[in-house]
Image: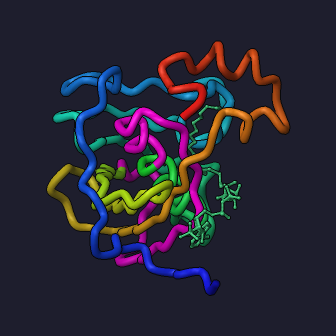
């Protein structure tokens, strides 16, 4: 069967519901891995994205474009911006309380983002159909209500923890992520 490239939910998709054990409204979302290029606090040149959920349904995050993130002189690289969108969407699936990975990510670049800019990110889920979650995000320059520089839409696919064990230690991974369902 041909694979759909749509990142919008199909008819019959369900809106996400609050999950027991998922991050509660007002809580900070901790990095899933301290060496993650996008959110890891220990990564030397990463985005050091910090995030929270104000309402248990959306995720807000910030990252400040640094010297290490340039593509054109003094401007953020588009791939780095896509990474930020992937990560904030990835953090918003924490709210679904199951492990997911990116299957498809679409990014629209509306404005250049200079070095030194703090990008204010927001992500949310538009629907779930089986293992597929349909999500969206935006990045605004300088303030939560600043001009939109980047938009993204994504299809994330639910996986089990074994997905992450193929290239890492499952026991360590599971111990680090006890807040996920281990066998969804
Ligand atoms: C560290 C551990 C704990 C947790 C950590 C938190 C991590 C947070 C990380 C945050 C970082 C940010 C996040 C990151 O960066 S995650 C890193 C980037 N992503 C990946 O590495 C994923 C690589 N891909 C795969 O592993 C497999 O392809 C997956 C698992 C995705 C599916 O292979 P699997 O064999 O399991 O399933 P399936 O192939 O039967 O597909 C199932 C359904 O999905 C549909 N489909 C699939 N792909 C696409 C597509 N591209 N467009 C449209 N549709 C697609 C497919 O048609 C089917 O639909 P249907 O026929 O049922 O209708």
Where 112 falls versus 36 (above or below)? below
What segment is highlighted magenta in the picture?
A: 90-118
Examine the image and state in which quarter residue 128 appears: bottom left
Q: Residue at x 36, y 69 (%)?
A: 151
The quarter of the image holding the N terminus is bottom right
Decide whether residue 26 is among the magenta residues.
no
Examine the image and state in which quarter residue 83 appears: bottom right
Residue 105, image x, y percentages:
52, 68
Where 161 falls versus 16 (above or below)? above
Residue 152, image x, y percentages:
40, 67
Q: Which quarter of the rendered image does ligand 1 occupy? A: bottom right
Numbered disc total: 0
Decide whether residue 104 is among the magenta residues.
yes
Q: Residue at x 34, y 74 (%)?
A: 10
Give left or right: position of 119 versus 171: left
Where 98 falls versus 23 (above or below)? below
Residue 121, image x, y percentages:
33, 51
The single residue placed furthest to the top in the displayed view is 175
Q: Residue at x 68, y 30 (%)?
A: 35
């Amino acid at each position: 069967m041909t694979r759909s490239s749509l990142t919008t939910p199909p008819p019959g998709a369900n809106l996400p519901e609050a999950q027991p054990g998922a991050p509660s409204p007002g809580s900070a979302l901790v990095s899933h891995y301290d060496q993650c290029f996008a959110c890891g606090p220990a990564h030397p040149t990463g985005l050091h994205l910090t995030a929270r959920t104000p309402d248990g349904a959306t995720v807000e995050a910030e990252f400040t474009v640094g010297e290490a993130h340039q593509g054109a002189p003094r401007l953020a690289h588009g791939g780095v911006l896509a990474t930020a969108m992937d990560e904030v969407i990835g953090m918003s699936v924490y709210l679904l309380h199951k492990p997911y990975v990116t299957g498809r990510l679409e990014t629209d670049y509306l404005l250049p983002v200079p070095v030194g800019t703090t990008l204010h990110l927001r992500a949310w889920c538009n629907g779930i159909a089986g293992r597929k979650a349909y999500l969206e995000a935006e990045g605004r320059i300088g303030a939560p209500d600043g001009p939109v520089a980047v938009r993204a839409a994504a299809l994330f696919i639910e996986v089990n923890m074994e997905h992450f064990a193929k290239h890492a230690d499952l026991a360590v991974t599971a111990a680090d992520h006890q807040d996920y369902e281990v066998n969804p």
